Amino acid sequence: MKKLLFLIVLVVAGYLVYNHYWKPSQKPTETSGQPTPVGTAPQAPSEKPSGITLYEQGKYKEAIPRLEEEIKENPSETDRFLSYIGWSYEKLDKPDKALKIWERLLKEYPTSIYSGDAHYQVGRRSKKREEKLQHLETAIVKFPESQGAREAGMYLGEYYLSLKDEVNKEYKARNAFSLALKSNLPQEKITEIKGRLTDLNKKLVFSSFRTPDSTIYTVKIGDNLTSISRKFKVEAGGDIAPGHIRRINNLKSATIFPDDKLKILTGEIWAKVNKTNITLTLYINNDFIKEYPVSIGDPNKNMDTSAGTFTIGSKVVHPTWYKKTEDGRKEEVPYGDKRNVLGTRWMGFKESPELGIHGTTNPESIGKKISNGCIRMYNNDVEEVYDLISENTRVVIEE
């Protein structure tokens, strides 16, 4: 009997020790159902994406509440977040909600760069003409670096052209379109706008139509085209080159009479050469006139066309080419000689007299990087440029 009791006590004691020290706990852990992989620490919850990131991903609906949260988290950037909220509503085609955001942005942050976006959006919705023009022009003039200014440029250009009674509407449209070209637009839209500008300039530049960047001169007794050209410091031309006044006014001859009205461009005309697009563009002040295809140099084949700002120092009609021979001498190749590659005009740079803008006897080379550092143009194009610009004209060459 004593032995039986001893065995029962021993079994009970063993059971209690097993349950207390050896049996694993069945209590669920915090990672129950999501086991942590061996060798790694538990993963912290992922950080919320920013509202701007969501916007850039095209998740406009999700971006709005996140941007509203960020306004509370970082109130110093409220104007920036409001702009993205406004654009999000635009993308979601909710104009009423977008307009409230744009109006709030203008009221609370009138000097913020993002107000350029707001002025554009409010302006294009305005029903009143004066209010519309005020907002759109404010976006362009006061906030030129904003995306709204770029959009306003395109919209305002079309709007001006639609008005029948707006003074200088073509001139104002050109200014707006020219600004739009500075934005990051699709290539097909850039090509379209340049085409519109080229058409506008047939009237604004290449005709006797008066513009704010030109003057109308009344011919007096004793005047001639040379004396008038010198007075206004424009290209006089001559027997071969028409010159500035004849080119602008489409005069068939140099004969003029007292009381004739002659248009002369008074804005700064300058040129920009883009090495990437291989083009030369003429501007008047900051407005686009016309773009021309050119040929430039290639450092890997011959000589590079150096980037920088240059000045026209010399102008020659039917230029002589001074060719370098193999032994280092200069050979004079007159105009008309088949070996003369300069075409019908030469405009040399004051800073590098051996380089400049000229025509070509090899039109197939235009559009290529094949020159010895100069800018080649089709002869018809270089003759037009020659008449429009004068000595001391600025030429900007950019990569």
Image (cartoon, helix red, strand yellow):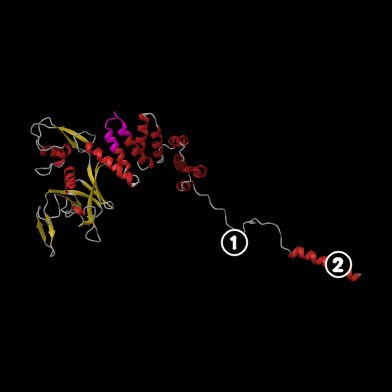
| Magenta segment | 159-174
Dot 1 crowding, Cα within 10 Å, few <14, some 14–19, many 20+: few
Asked whether 179 falls inside the magenta stretch, the response is no
The tag on residue 108 is: none
Label 1 SS:
loop
Please provide percent x and percent y for residue 381: 19, 46
Amino acid type for the residue under numbered disc 1: Pro
Label 2 SS:
helix
Decide: is 383 above or below 222.
below
Please provide percent x and percent y for residue 24: 71, 62
Q: In this view, which residue lies farthest toward the left? A: 222
Task: Kindly tell me whether residue 143 is visible in this rendering.
Answer: no
Disc 1 to disc 2: CB gap under 8 Å: no
For label 2, the residue is 8
For label 1, the residue is 37
Q: In this view, which residue lies farthest toward the bottom? A: 3
Asked whether 166 falls inside the magenta stretch, the response is yes
Viewer-nearest residue: 247 or 93: 93
Viewer-nearest residue: 26 or 336: 336
- Measured in 3D between alpha carbons, the distance from the residue under mark 1 to the one under mark 2, in whole angstroms, is 45 Å
Q: Which of the two labelled residues, at mark 1 and mark 2, occupies the earlier sequence position?
A: 2
Amino acid type for the residue under numbered disc 2: Ile
Task: Kindly tell me whether residue 58 is visible in this rendering.
Answer: yes
